[in-house]
Amino acid sequence: MKKKVISVFMASMVALSLVACGGSSEPAATPVVEEKEVAVEETTVEETDEAIVEEVADFTILDVTTDLVDAGIYAVDDNNTEYVITLFRDPDDNTYISLMLVAADESGDLICGAYDGDSVTTVPDKENGVDWTVFDIIDVYTETECTIVFAEGDDGSVAVSNADFSLIMEGQYLSEEETIAYMGAAVSYIQ
């Protein structure tokens, strides 16, 4: 019985190696895994139309679906610059936040980064009666440190601020569908 199990195992391994190499009797020049690694290393944001959120996972903001959106927040400042904050997850449940800025002349920018409990702090604002949630992230596109700030009121309201709290805007929540639409538009603002 033991010899039969070993024979079946060896036959499976031979069949598996043939499938992995494309069924050829000649050895492949490079293993499939190495070819994928080279493709990932050579891919850059400039070479694609997609925003790479995490190269290792090969996940982009265009892959975010409504079930992965945790929140979408929209605000406009006095200069008609639009701010769209999105909290979302990848299929592995890693958490991300993005901020899209679109100026009145339709120029814009997008920052995006992963966050966890260590990169999120709360700043109490007794004057306005809210606690600001501050996300300190590393932007995946420029690899620079960035800060994204918003606050939720007890009444369901939301506000957006810049890092030094000198610009505070009343915001509104977006539906998951609206958030996905903004994320699709955000790809054109990657710098």
Image (spheres, rainbow, N blue to C red):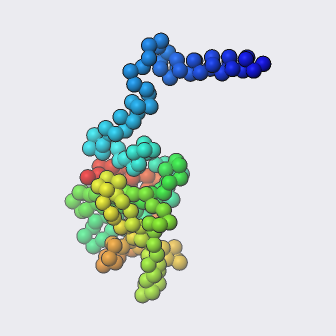
Q: Is residue 45 above or below residue 143?
A: above
Estimate the x, y position of residue 79 in percent, counting from the top left: 25, 70
Q: Is residue 163 above or below residue 73?
A: below
Snapshot quadrant of residue 44 = top left
Residue at the image position 39 percent from the left and 57 percent from the top = 113
Q: Is residue 61 above or below residue 166?
A: above
**Left or right: 182 as drawn, with respect to 129:** left
Estimate the x, y position of residue 147 in percent, counting from the top left: 36, 67
Residue at the image position 73 percent from the left and 17 percent from the top = 4
Q: Seen from this angle, which residue lies furthest left?
A: 105
Q: Can I make out residue 110 in this image? A: no
Q: Is residue 101 above or below residue 169?
A: above
Snapshot quadrant of residue 107 = bottom left
Estimate the x, y position of residue 158 in percent, counting from the top left: 45, 72
In-front residue for pair 9/89: 9
Estimate the x, y position of residue 47 in percent, counting from the top left: 28, 40
In-front residue for pair 125/33: 33
Residue at the image position 41 percent from the left and 48 percent from the top = 54
In-front residue for pair 156/29: 29
Which quadrant is the N terminus positioned in?
A: top right
Residue at the image position 28 percent from the left and 57 percent from the top = 109
Q: Can I make out residue 134 in this image? A: yes
